Amino acid sequence: MSNKKIKVRIYPNGEISAYTEGMKGEECLKYADELEALLEARIVDSELLDEYYEKAEVAEFEEEVEVLNEEN
């Protein structure tokens, strides 16, 4: 499992840049609105990094369930 991070840099002139690490595909885009609200800012420019074009890993699992019949 990868470490997912959002890195934010605030410059002395008030400019803010942010990017994600460890998120593949469109997952990184889910955080754009939250970042705008948290930073009280508006996105004016964006760039998709290489991780955006990688497939997100989908966890697959199998669960075995045993059903017990209770008899009185």
Image (cartoon, rainbow, N blue to C red):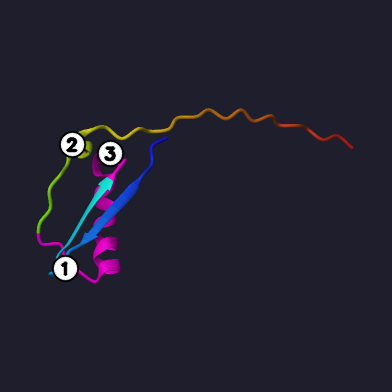
Residue interval drawn in magenta: 21-44
- Is residue 43 in the magenta section? yes
Describe residue 24's horizontal placement relative to residue 71 as left or right.
left
User: Which residue ends up furthest to the front in the rendered image?
Assistant: 12
Residue at 15 percent across and 62 percent down: it is 43
For the residues marked 2 and 3, what is the alpha-carbon distance in whole angstroms?
9 Å
Q: Residue tagged by mark 1? A: 12
For the residue marked with disc 2, what is the amino acid? Answer: Asp
Residue at 33 percent across and 48 percent down: it is 5
Q: Earlier in the sequence, mark 1 or mark 2?
A: 1
User: Which quadrant is home to the C terminus?
Assistant: top right
For the residues marked 1 and 2, what is the alpha-carbon distance in whole angstroms?
28 Å
The quarter holding residue 26 reads top left
Q: Nearer the viewer, mark 2 or mark 3?
A: 2
Describe residue 13's horizontal placement relative to residue 70 as left or right.
left
For the residue marked with disc 1, what is the amino acid? Answer: Pro
Q: Residue tagged by mark 3? A: 24
Magenta region, mostly helix, strand or loop?
helix
- Is residue 57 in the magenta section? no
Q: For label 3, count other residues whose C-alpha is less than 10 Å away and answer few (under 14), some (14-19) or many (20+).
A: some
